Image: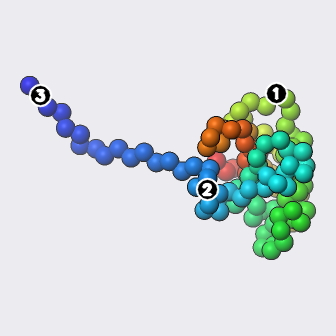
Amino acid sequence: METKTQTETEYIVSYTRGDALRDGVLVDVSELAARLRWRVPVVLTAGILDALSGDSDQPLSMRPAVVAALAAAGLSLDETVKLDQRVPFVTPGPSGDVSGVVVIHRGDAFEIVATLMLDYED
């Protein structure tokens, strides 16, 4: 009888949306987004937040480029958007136009959420 042994170690890595929020990789802007008529929780990646605000120490709701990005991303969406589809938008930033994408997808508890990120982020 032949016995098989496992020679490779398997790793399962899970990095959740909640983990990314705690680490500052994602920034929750849901309260501001709700005021702009978003109906789902919304986060920005640290990359797009940096491109939109630079070193600003103002609250997110007072940063015109963040508000403009939420508005532009919202306008880019329509009823035909599918989950996990990357929908492009362009918004003015402090150093010129910022190209981003908005993705509507499932969150940690399978709820519908949105993430705004730079067009080259994943």
User: Which is nearer the N-term, disc 1 or disc 3?
Assistant: 3
Going by the numbered disc 3, the residue's amino acid type is Glu
Q: Quadrant of the N terminus?
A: top left
Q: Position of residue 71 (x, y in %)?
A: 90, 49
Give me the C-alpha separation between circle 1 and circle 3: 55 Å
Circles 1 and 3, Cβ within 8 Å, touching? The answer is no
**Under tag 2, what secondary structure?**
helix
> Relative to 12, is 80 above or below?
above
Q: Which mark is residue 89?
A: none
Q: Quadrant of residue 5?
A: top left
Classify residue 8 as left or right of residue 111.
left
Q: Which secondary structure lies at badge 1?
A: loop
Where residue 96 appears, as percent x and y from the top left, is 86, 61
* Closer to the camera in the image, 108 or 86: 108
Dot 3 lies on which element? loop
* Earlier sequence position, callout 3 versus callout 2: 3
Q: Give residue 2's mark.
A: 3
